[in-house]
Amino acid sequence: MPQIGVVIPAWNAEAFLAESIESVRAQTFADWRLVVLDDGSTDGTAALAQRYADLDDRVVVVSQPNGGLSAARNAGVAALPPEVEYCLFLDADDLLQPRALELLLPAASRPGLIGAHGLPREVDEHGVPAPKQLHEAWGYVRQQAQRYRIRALRPEESTDFAALVIWPCIETAGQVLIRRDALEAAGPWRSMPGEDWEMWLRLATRGSFGYVPEYVMSKRERSDSLSRDGKWLARAEPQIRQMLTSDALRPEQRRVARMGHLLSCWVKLTWVRDDLRARRWNSALRNTYRWGKSSLRFARVAWRY
């Protein structure tokens, strides 16, 4: 059976790292290797990780000067054994569900796919789950750009480029198992806002992600997290949209990217509608601003696709 490599980039992560490592060690699928990439930490991160490496020979610790999340992920992949065929990148404060690898591997192994993703469950700083049902999870409802309309994907359908160009329905790296050969073909992680979304799009130009409609990980929402109010998406989207006009994409892919950009404006408008119906006035104002900026951006770059 193919081995799975898990990479945990860790920078000053002593407070939560033990829980993250334990969530890997608790997997029902046992044929994994874990690289904890200490990215220049100044606290007890490296020492904590080394204690686990001394306890479990499937755990390896690699230290390097601080280079940021993407550099740490790239170094972590390079440190995995050559026999590892699938990679998963878990943030140092997030947690895998016990059956995560068991659920993701069969979906990622289907012919023609470059990986598979499940769903993230939000937890607070103390690990307490948010009071949301499965159908409320980020990415449970996936939508695909199809000409001038949005089509909802069925659970048995994979997540493809036409879905990811509307908005990042894959929220975080810990919910995704990626074929190593597809990752190497797509190229390294890039240091930029929205590096996850950019990577999913780059991978999706080569194939689709299988979909597992179950929780596979818990994403810790901390008080200083950009994802709490969508700020990371606002920062990332201009660069992502600009990159999607590149000649590196095939003409058909650029056409889909243009339509995805247009439909993303429509999705933001539906956020405003939902806020108004629920009388969330502050959120409605914020989302109106986002819709306006996105629409103006589309008007400026539509001809470049």
Image (cartoon, helix red, strand yellow):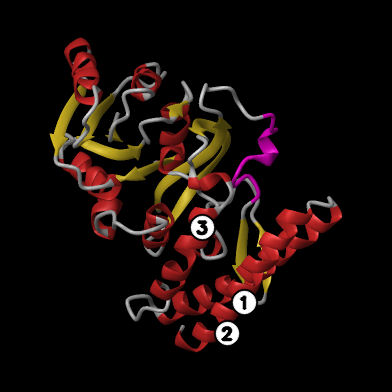
| Residue 52 x/y as whole percent | 24, 15
The numbered disc on residue 271 is none
Residue 222 vertical position relative to residue 126 in the rendered view, above or below: below
Task: Indicate the secondary structure of the residue bearing disc 1.
Answer: helix
On the image, numbered disc 3 is attached to which residue? Answer: 233
Residue under numbered circle 1: 295
Which residue is labeled 2 in the image?
299
Disc on the earlier residue, 1 or 3: 3
Range drawn in magenta: 131-141
Residue 110 visible to an observer of this rendering: no
Which class describes the residues within 10 Å of circle 2: few (<14), some (14-19), or many (20+)?
few
Counting from the top left corner in percent of width and height, residue 177 is at 39, 40
Residue displayed at 23% across by 30% down: 35
Chief secondary structure of the magenta span?
Answer: loop
All told, the count of numbered labels is 3
Above or below, 177 against 1 in this view is: below
Q: Nearer the viewer, residue 247 or 296?
A: 296
Q: Residue at x 42, y 82 (%)?
A: 251
- CB atoms at circles 2 and 1 under 8 Å apart? yes
Q: Badge 1: how crowded within 10 Å, few (<14), some, or many (20+)?
A: some
Residue type at tag 2:
Ala
Local SS, label 3: helix
270 lies left or right of 168: right
Three-letter amino acid code of the residue under disc 1: Ser
Is residue 262 depicted above or below 277 in this figure? below
Q: Is residue 106 visible?
A: yes
